Image: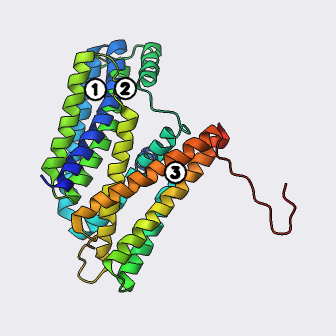
Amino acid sequence: MSGSTAGLALSTLLASAVEFVEAFTIVLAMGLTRGWRSTLAGTISALVLLAGVAAIAGYALITWFPKSVLQIAIGSLLLVFGLQWLRKSILRASGLKALHDEDETFREETEAGQRAAADVRAGLDWFGFVGSFKGVFLEGLEVIFIVITFGLTAHSMPTAIAGASIGGVIVLIAGLIFHKPLSRVPENTMKFAVGLLLSTFGTFWAVEGLGVFRAGRDSLRWPGGDAALIAVLAAWCALSWLAVRLLSSYARGELTVTPQPMPGEEPA
Amino acid sequence: MRFIVGFGRFWWDFIIGDDWKLAAGVAVVLVVGGTLTGETHLSNVALTLLVGAGIVLVVSTSIIAGAYAAHRKN
């Protein structure tokens, strides 16, 4: 297995694990407060719809778009998507943004489940059905987005699917064993790692895709080929580390930004 | 109409997130990178380094702006 394939598998595994943990929290809260029958019906419906979306989106992208357009479009989307994750992770690690807390999410979802009035439709508790359906569908959509973008751009859809599946199975087994929110999973750290990996692959592919603007439309080649991925990852890690260090000091008030006097003006 | 607005808002939140300036900055860097790629004879090394540096600059600006806003809010 090459380094880029391993990176691809690790990225989809971590990203899917993070999303599955969040979906699991919602499903657990709905199941415990609104009953398991409606909750599982909502979960299964969402999974069926997700499978349809994945098949249609994957087929359409492969069939209708030329490879070079796919590379620049998907690379750019992945880059923007990944940089948002990285930015939030840096602000969280610096103490400038609240950490994601599964216990808090579980408490909120449980309270919402307890407050909602009974509304039975088609023999199902509608709040439980819709709550679990939305939770699984929205979190699952992020996994599908990452799997399709990684799989298509790296020409290794089986690796991307395998990584995401393993992540999902690990979370499901842990959830079945512990039967409570998986708050001990280092979710914020995992999100940071996913942000770094998404930004790395996004940068790599978006820049390669710029070759579409050249005669011949061949992808740009990074110096060193695929090995440049390691350099890009190292650069993002170094930048993130520096940002967290500086911003942590800023958050603690050790680092302040004071306005400089204009030329000819008396210092304050 | 509500469905279209909701659908658009979902994808906006999904891809762009809470800082549209970061996405806009990346788009500008890629457009400039595309123009340089198509209209000049810069080497691959120069192009990858220039575009990479542009992306880093955009992200750094976004992080600093986010930190400043969060610090003021707190």
Quick one: SS at disc 3? loop
Residue A44 in view of the camera: no
Q: CA distance from mark 2 to mark 1?
A: 8 Å
**Dot 2 or dot 1, earlier in sequence:** 1
Badge nearest the viewer, 3 or 1: 3
Q: Chain of mark 2?
A: A
Alpha carbon separation for disc pair 3 and 1: 32 Å
The answer to whether the residues at label 2 and label 1 have Cβ atoms under 8 Å apart is yes
Label 2: which residue?
A131
Image side of residue A146 versus residue A262, left or right: left
Q: Secondary structure at mark 1?
A: helix
Quadrant holding the C terminus of chain B: top right
**Above/below status of A82 relative to A65:** above
Depth check, front residue: A239 or A23: A239
Whether residue A2 is visible to the viewer of this picture, yes or no, is yes
Chain bearing tag 3 is B
- Give the total number of marks visible in the rendering: 3
At label 1, the amino acid type is Gly
> Is label 2 in a helix, a strand or a loop?
helix
Q: Which circle marks residue B9 in the picture?
A: none
Mark sitting on residue B19: 3
Residue designated by label 1: A42
Label 1: chain letter? A
Q: Amino acid at mark 3?
A: Asp
Question: How many residues crowd mark 3 within 10 Å: few (<14), some (14–19), many (20+)?
Answer: some
Compared to B12, does A118 lie above or below? above
Q: Position of residue A98 (x, y in %)?
A: 52, 33
